[in-house]
Image (cartoon, rainbow, N blue to C red):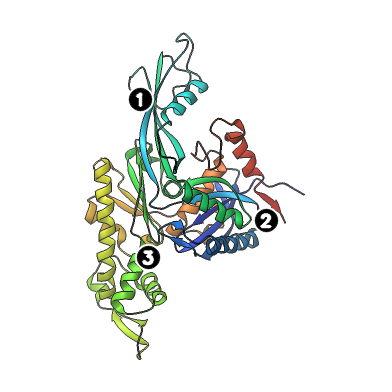
């Protein structure tokens, strides 16, 4: 039976679970081979709260992806989100044994390892150690010190940690669905990978992924990940506002948001009436699209204000020349980019998946940037998780080559 170099990516969101199958085309781009989507279940605020329900949702999405591409999924890269995640930047310093010899890749690895060592409680674990920059003897930063000379090498890393229980529950949920977890990747980092350009990363940009119950932020400064954060509001809160204020079922409110929603009130929007199924004896009623926009704008402004506060607190609000790139299903609201520019005084655009081929018509909206980013990380074989869930710290079998081999075994053609 012919082997495949395809990989799988699984994005477990608050509103939907997406499984994606991809490989690399002759130009080095991700080629989408299959996609499966299922309604989410068993999640609250981005974390698993019912393993059986979440497992069934994952299994359904995986089965649909398998049917789409004609392959059997055995393992994959999985995204993680939720308020339990936190991050910090850290520096490490190592001495170079012989300054008459150039700095080696081993020296660079030692510096990253030292910079990735922080003290955390026993109920938390390190998910990512992402290199940010290097300095030789305290001089100006260099992009790669290998081959250069010096007696001391500094490295800075961005470290992401998460609750052990949340990681264990996520892993068990996926494995109970019959899928081995090869890599756990921060969802906001995956969304950034799926939507940002190289120029945006270099100039400074914040990828803002507005999910169902949370909003995730990934800041790039001078080309590297500088800050990540999770906020406790998302698109589901907009739907809940509509359901409560219009006195209609959740399903009707969600459909109203998706089909007629706008993040800004305008004269054009206000002149239109839309029909909605409501509670009570009169099961259907007409409401002004302008009133719907007013409700949505209020909550969207609150989310954007929280983003601004977080960026200012972290010291990056004035460093983002490329502004904001909005992803996630809520970014499909008409006018949300214009509202973001107005509220934060920064450039803003809505980001869809970039740099992929194949079945792109199935994933050509901002709602799929995270799963595409997960696939890109998996295809590189170097998703920035220095210590994947369950890996022993210095075990070479848990390193780069093991992950590449695992991704290569992810599929068996049917």
Which secondary structure lies at badge 3? helix
Alpha carbon separation for disc pair 3 and 1:
42 Å
Alpha carbon separation for disc pair 2 and 3:
33 Å
Q: Nearer the viewer, mark 3 or mark 1?
A: 3
Location of residue 73 by image quarter: bottom right
318 horizontally vs 146: left or right: left
Within-10-Å neighbours for mark 2: few <14, some 14–19, many 20+: many
Q: Are marks 2 and 3 in contact (CB under 8 Å)?
A: no
334 horizontally vs 170: left or right: left
Q: Exactly how many numbered labels are in the figure?
A: 3
Seen as rendered, the residue at the extreme bottom is 281
Report x, y in % for residue 342: 22, 56
Identify the residue under disc 3.
Answer: 236
Marker disc for residue 262: none
319 horizontally vs 42: left or right: left
Marker disc for residue 141: 1
N-terminal of the two: label 2 or label 3?
Answer: 2
N-terminal of the two: label 3 or label 1?
Answer: 1
Q: Nearer the viewer, residue 228 or 289?
A: 228
Within-10-Å neighbours for mark 1: few <14, some 14–19, many 20+: some
Q: Residue at x 41, y 44 (%)?
A: 197
Seen as rendered, the residue at the extreme top is 100
Report x, y in % for residue 84: 40, 49
Q: Nearer the viewer, mark 2 or mark 3?
A: 3
Which secondary structure lies at badge 2? strand
Identify the residue under disc 2.
Answer: 71
370 horizontally vs 4: left or right: left
Q: Nearer the viewer, residue 266 or 244?
A: 244
Report x, y in % for residue 236: 37, 65
């Amino acid at each position: 039976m012919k082997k495949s170099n395809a990989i799988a990516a699984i994005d477990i969101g608050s509103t939907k679970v997406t499984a994606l199958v991809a490989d690399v085309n002759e130009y080095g781009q991700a080629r989408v081979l299959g996609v499966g989507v299922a309604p989410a279940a068993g999640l609250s605020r981005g974390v698993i709260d019912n393993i059986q329900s979440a497992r069934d949702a994952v299994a359904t999405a995986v089965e649909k992806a398998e049917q789409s591409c004609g392959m059997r999924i055995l393992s994959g890269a999985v995204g993680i989100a939720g308020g339990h995640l936190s991050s910090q930047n850290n520096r490490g310093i190592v001495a170079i044994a012989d300054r008459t010899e150039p700095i080696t890749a081993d020296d660079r690895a030692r510096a990253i390892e030292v910079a990735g060592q922080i003290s955390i409680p026993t109920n938390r674990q390190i998910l990512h150690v992402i290199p940010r920059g290097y300095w030789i003897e305290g001089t100006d930063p260099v992009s790669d010190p290998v081959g250069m000379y010096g007696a001391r090498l500094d490295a800075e890393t961005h470290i992401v940690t998460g609750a052990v229980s949340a990681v264990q529950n996520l892993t068990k949920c996926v494995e109970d669905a019959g899928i081995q977890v090869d890599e756990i990747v921060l969802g906001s980092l995956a969304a950034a990978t799926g939507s940002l350009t190289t120029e945006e990363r270099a100039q400074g940009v914040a990828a803002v992924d507005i999910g169902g119950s949370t909003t995730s932020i990934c800041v790039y400064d001078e080309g590297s990940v500088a800050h990540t954060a999770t906020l406790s509001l998302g698109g589901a809160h907009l739907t809940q506002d509509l359901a409560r204020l219009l006195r209609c079922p959740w399903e009707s409110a969600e459909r109203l948001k998706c089909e007629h929603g706008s993040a800004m009130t305008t004269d054009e929007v206000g002149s239109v009436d839309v029909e909605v199924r409501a509670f009570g004896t009169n099961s259907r009623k007409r409401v002004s699209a302008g009133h719907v926009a007013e409700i949505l704008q209020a909550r969207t402004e609150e989310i954007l204000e929280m983003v601004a506060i977080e960026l200012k607190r972290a010291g990056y609000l004035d460093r983002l020349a490329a502004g904001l790139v909005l992803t996630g299903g809520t970014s499909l609201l008409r006018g949300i980019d214009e509202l973001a520019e107005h509220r934060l005084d920064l450039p803003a655009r809505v980001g869809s998946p970039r740099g992929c081929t194949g079945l792109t018509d199935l994933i050509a909206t901002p709602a799929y940037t995270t799963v595409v980013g997960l696939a890109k990380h998996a295809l590189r074989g170097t998703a920035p998780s220095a210590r994947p869930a369950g890996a022993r710290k210095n075990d070479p079998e848990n390193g780069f080559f093991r992950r590449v081999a695992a991704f290569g075994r992810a599929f068996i053609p049917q």
